[in-house]
Amino acid sequence: MSKFRRLGWLNRLALGLLGVLFVVLIGVFPSNSQEAQTLRVGTEPAFPPFEMKAETGELEGFDIDLMNAIGKEAGLKVEFLSLPFDGLIPALQANTIDAAISGMTITAERAQTIAFSRPYFKAGLALAVKEGNQEIKSFDDLKNKRIAVQIGTTGAGEAGKIEGAQVSQFDSAPLALQELANGRVDAVINDAPVTLYAIKQAQLQGIEVVGQLLTEEYFGIALPKNSPNIEKINGAIATLLENGTYNAIYEKWFGTAPPELPLAAPALEGATAQPFDYGKLFSNLLVGALVTLALTACSIFFGMIGGTLVAIALISPYTPLRWLCRAYVEFFRGTPMLVQIFMIYFGLPALLQGLGLNFNFERFPAAVLALSLNSAAYLAEIIRGGIQAVERGQWEASESLGMGSVETMRYVIFPQALRQMLPPLSNEFITLIKDTSLVAVIGFEELFRQGQLVVATTYRAFEVYAAVALVYLVLTSVSATGFRWLESYMNPLRKMSKAKA
Ligand code: GLN
């Protein structure tokens, strides 16, 4: 017998795991010589004219040209990675990327967690409204108005300071501008060059920029703290400014000569460190948890009504009705919930407006509708299964006692069916609690989105998402316990033993 076989299965398993770990580690830590050459640069390519995707699928824009020029000058091979804007700083902290160029404003808050290169662009925030809006002429007119912004940006920060404003946060600047064009908000606060580009070059209709620039900002290349590349990148920027390359890239994208750039961003002067606000995290997560609960409760309520009706239809003798309901169940079970949410929130209004109806969805009803339609499909199957699991003999016995079909259903079949249904119902309820996080994609601020919003300003990705996970766990554990209690409460054996006692 070979030595290996004598090791016993536990040892063999341990050896196998060690082998897998070794292979994974080799994959994760590439050799140093390769890393020194390549600079992994994160960017969010939905910020034209700074970074965007050309029709060929390649990245292009002012930042892209500049970064490539910097790489050439500094002897670094630039490799771009697309990431969401609010994921760039966490990725830098995690060292998943070595730098980020993404129209990122140098701010004192960000400088607490990451480092910045010297400023490479002078920008500022602009206010955009629908053409001909007489009410909003400046920043001061924004009180109690509906404003769309991009999550984690300086624009979102400014909007947060406005009294009574309802701020909707989107994953990208074009989505926020689209929301304004669709008339669902009154204004957008966003970087001026990007809004102007959307109006002029991308021909976003019916939008104008009003008033003065709200802020003066400088963009910088973001790097992990203590990055060995800071000096190289700053040196390269200085050379490009001197030798005319910077001017040429600027003229290519903006058609004018660039303004003067300071050596350091004024925002960093006199900046003091701010402690992490646990109170704010707690209150945000509490609000998010309540919204998630409300969303789950409404969706399970409507889902139960819909699911019961569909279940009855599924066991009815009417074939067309049965087929129709079967198709419904298959569609909602067989397509991703995310697609259903997009279809309902973005697609349905467009379809109805196309038919000449003046229809627009608020986020809450849209989210409840999507979740209810989806859970009704699953619940219908659970309810149908529960009813059909009760033996036929029970119907016959009730009939022989002279009970009608409604009475039989109510007093004999349903109580037994309900007991059968409880474990899968509990599963569905827990799944639904977790699935509510998907409606974050339409900017709805439930638990997960609240966490995302905190990360967008504090950059404490691990702690915050761990806290979010913990809250979900509490919600699901409480409901699982509730269902278990219900199961034992409805157990006839328990009732019998109680009666005996
Ligand atoms: N300049 C803004 C900021 O840094 C927005 C940047 C972006 O959306 N790419 O917050």
Image: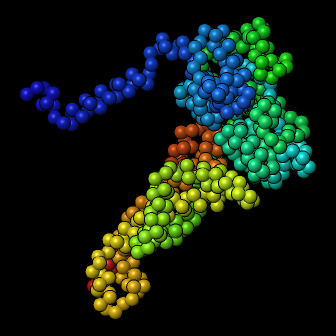
The percent position of residue 208, horizontal first and vertical second, equals: 85, 40
Q: Is residue 293 visible?
A: no
Q: Is the residue 9 above or below the residue 492 in the image?
A: above
- Check the picture and name the quadrant holding the N terminus: top left
Rendered image coloring scheme: rainbow
Name the residue located 80 percent from the left edge and 17 percent from the top edge: 251
- Give the residue furthest to the left: 1
- Check the picture and name the quadrant holding the C terminus: bottom left
Write down the quadrant of residue 353 in the picture: bottom right
The one of 232 and 259 positioned closer to us in this rendering: 259
- Give the residue furthest to the front: 320
The one of 461 and 244 positioned closer to us in this rendering: 244
Q: Quadrant of ligand 1?
A: top right
Q: Is residue 38 visible?
A: yes
The one of 125 and 402 positioned closer to us in this rendering: 402
Q: Is the residue 62 above or below the residue 272 in the image?
A: above
Name the residue located 72 percent from the left edge and 30 percent from the top edge: 48
Q: Is the residue 342 above or below the residue 14 in the image?
A: below
Name the residue located 75 percent from the left edge and 49 percent from the top edge: 182
The percent position of residue 339, horizontal first and vertical second, equals: 55, 49
The percent position of residue 133, horizontal first and vertical second, equals: 88, 48
Name the residue located 83 percent from the left edge and 20 percent from the top edge: 255
Total tally of numbered discs in the picture: 0
The percent position of residue 220, horizontal first and vertical second, equals: 71, 24
- Give the residue furthest to the top: 243
